[in-house]
Image (cartoon, helix red, strand yellow):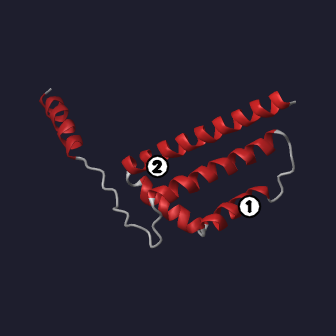
Amino acid sequence: MRYRFTFLLLVPLLLSCYHENQPEISPPDHLLSEKEMVNILTDVQLAEGAITYRRTRRIEQQNFRESAYKQVFSTYGINAKILNENLNYYNNNPEKMEQVYDKVLAKLSRIQGQLKEETIRSDSVK
């Protein structure tokens, strides 16, 4: 009984001392600003949406994903490595990443609203 009691006291003590050691990620050589990340991630989300749309409509997909990402990368003068390094950096700081994604969602909502307005206008003209 004494060992059980000691065990029950020792386990919470050991678990409370546990601290997850996450390596500190230093800023990448080509650090993208928060505004650049918002713009890039918005375009990436739009590209992923187009890829998904094409897949669900069974439209030819050959090289579409690759060309969509090449377009995003060339627009911003980056490559996949730079984007991944920046994503890792921002993901290491959850508060910053949450701010970035909140802005991405707001921007996507604005785009969606503009598209709905255009659809309504074009329907009323017909």
- x, y percentage for residue 68? 72, 58
Asked whether the residues under the numbered discs 2 and 1 touch, taking CB atoms below 8 Å apart as contact, a structural biologist would say: no
Number of numbered discs: 2
Instruction: Decide: is 35 above or below 108.
Output: below
Residue 66 spot, x, y in % from top left: 74, 61
- Residue at image position (59%, 39%) is 110
Taking the image as shown, residue 4 lies to the left or right of residue 117, namely left
- For the point 43% across and 60% down, which residue is it? 89
Residue located 48% across and 56% down the image: 35
Give the Cα separation between the discs numbered 2 and 1. Answer: 25 Å
Which is nearer the eye, 64 or 23? 64
Q: Secondary structure at mark 1?
A: helix
Q: Does 12 sit left or right of 90 as displayed?
A: left
Query: Between residues 5 and 37, which one lies in front from this camera angle?
Result: 37
Three-letter code for the amino acid on which mark 1 is drawn = Glu
> Is the N terminus in the top left, top right, bottom left or bottom right quadrant?
top left
Residue with the mark numbered 2: 100
Image coordinates for residue 86, horizontal then vertical, percent: 48, 62
Q: Residues within 10 Å of mark 1 (few under 14, many from 20)?
A: few
The mark nearer the N terminus, 2 or 1, is 1
Disc 2: CA contacts within 10 A as few (<14), some (14-19) or many (>=20): many
Indicate whether 53 appears above or below 37.
above
Q: Residue furthest bottom?
A: 29
**Residue at the image position 51 percent from the left and 59 percent from the top:** 36
